[in-house]
Image: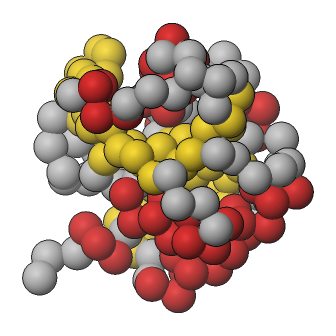
Amino acid sequence: MDTPPTAPAHDTAPPTPLHLTWDDIRSAVQVLTERVNAGGLPQAVVAIMRGGTVPAVWLAHRLGIRDVRAVEVVRTTGDGVNADKNPLPNVRNPASLGDLRGLDVLLVDDIAGSGVTLAHTADLLRDLGAARVRTAVLAVNRANWQQDAPPEDAVNHIAALYDTWIVFPWEEAV
């Protein structure tokens, strides 16, 4: 697993959300591109909708991967900062993934908060026959992490670690 850079920790009560810019995203995608390349090119890229769509497409272009798929997996009940979460992710339309049997798949999301959605979706891809499933995220919010293993051990490729809620440029109000 790659060891990503760490953003400064906050020592006070709930930190304010961090708003990433398009330049931040461009840099994060470049970091992920280099790390994925080092482990060999996947045959397909799968985005977790909605947030993973932009980085997945951007990564696929940079990696030269034309097989890009998406699946909607929802755990949060809203889009607000620290939105409530359902106990388990809800997978909508898994048939949209098509036939993954025998493929080397890169699963992409914008952020791993608790890590539950990413792990659940990776298991789904394996259940659908993917021979290899690697995971990549632009960011991990360690303040919400709920997996037994630390993020650096649970996620294959992480561009950056944070200790606060992240707001991505595609989430900004128009």
Image height check: is 155 above or below 64?
Answer: above
For the residue pair 30 and 41, the one nearer the viewer reads as: 41
From the viewer's perspective, tell me whether residue 124 is left or right of residue 63.
left
Q: Is residue 18 visible in this depiction of the protein?
A: yes
Number of callouts: 0
Residue 91 horizontal/vertical position (percent): 27, 24
* Quadrant where the image shows the N terminus: top right
For the residue pair 134 and 113, the one nearer the viewer reads as: 134
User: Which residue is at 46% across, 52% downward?
Assistant: 68
Image height check: is 53 above or below 90?
Answer: below
Residue 117 horizontal/vertical position (percent): 42, 29
Image height check: is 80 above or below 25?
Answer: above
Residue 116 horizontal/vertical position (percent): 46, 25
Instruction: Give the residue furthest to the right.
Output: 38
User: Which residue is at 37% across, 57% downward?
Assistant: 53
From the viewer's perspective, tell me whether residue 80 is left or right of residue 123.
left
Residue 73 horizontal/vertical position (percent): 30, 33
Q: Is residue 109 visible in this depiction of the protein?
A: no
Q: Colour scheme used in the picture?
A: secondary structure
